[in-house]
Amino acid sequence: MKYNPIFEPVKINPGQFVMVWIPGSDEIPMSVSHISKNSKISISVADVGETTHLMHQLKIGDQIGIRGPYGNWFTAQNGTSIVIGGGIGMASVLSIAQNLSNLKNNPEKIKIDKIICINGAKTKSELYFNQELQKILKSNDSLEICTDDGSFGFKGFTTEKLKEILNNEKSNVITVYACGPEKMLKTVFQICEDHNKIPVQLSLERMMRCGFGICGLCALEPTGLLVCQDGPIFTNEILREITDFGKIHRDFSGKTYNI
């Protein structure tokens, strides 16, 4: 008897991640930067380590391993949406920006008033997705570009631009979605707390080997919550409880380092 396997499309939501394996190297978590209507996905890879460097050497037809999706996801909310990406962290929030834009065109359940995107990097050459964001955003939306060195756009951090926007924003209903270095996310959280506890949905990135709650490398102290299983998206209520948020980094052995 001939067996014909049937592959069902896997539903992936904005903010979820997959584990990617390259033969001869470690398996690592990767954000999904684009989700097509037929559930095909794109991942965006910065050349920053052994596994990501090997990914940059791949050619069409080379095989890799992907499992997932894992984790929870961003949830669209009414009102003004502020989407922040720091460096390659923009990959994780690109899909929620697209989702918010889609909902803005079909406001039956969620009413999106406008979308403000803040795309930041150390320098111009490290900015990603500007063209994609310009296609996603509509007439009353805006794209703010920041570089630490002032080589393009606003000279300064994304968090400085966020402060400026919140000081001028007249909307009473705001949600902030963000991904980037954890130190940046900690500042985003604190700024939003100081502005009448604006709701945030932050995508945290921690070291992980398994992706589904076994290795414990991505634990958030003292809660015992795991980024892979309970996140990667966390809201104000949980972030207030995490004492090591924005302070530490773990290596593959579990050893912690200050950041």
Image (cartoon, rainbow, N blue to C red):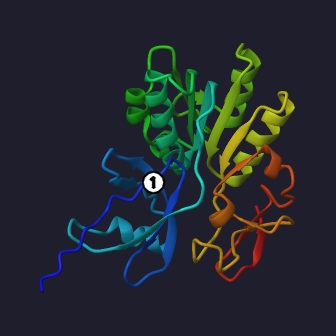
Horizontal arrangement in the rendering, residue 112 relative to residue 206 (left or right): left
**Residue drawn at (44%, 32%) of the image:** 133
**Is residue 127 in view from this perspective?**
no
The quarter of the displayed image where residue 165 is located: top right
| Image-based side of 13 in relation to 8, left or right | right
The residue labelled by disc 1 is 12
Quarter of the image where the N terminus is located: bottom left
Can you see residue 83? yes
SS of the residue at dot 1? loop
Q: Amino acid at mark 1?
A: Ile
| Quadrant, the C terminus | bottom right
* Outermost residue toward the front in this view: 1
User: Observer-nearest residue: 134 or 11?
Assistant: 11
Q: Position of residue 148 (x, y in %)?
A: 62, 39
Residue drawn at 54 percent across, 50 percent down: 15
Residue 45 vs 171, above or below: the answer is below
Crowding near the residue tagged with mark 1, few <14, some 14–19, many ≥20 C-alpha atoms within 10 Å: many
Looking at the image, which is closer to me, 8 or 229?
8
Q: Residue at x 20, y 69 (%)?
A: 61
Identify whether 12 is placed above or below 160.
below
Quadrant housing residue 12: bottom left
Q: Position of residue 234 (x, y in %)?
A: 71, 51
Q: Quadrant of residue 178?
A: top right
Where residue 17 sits in the image (x, y, percent)? 51, 59
Residue at 51% x, 71% y: name it: 28
Is residue 36 left or right of 98 when viewed as pictured? Answer: left
Q: Is residue 257 above or below residue 189?
A: below
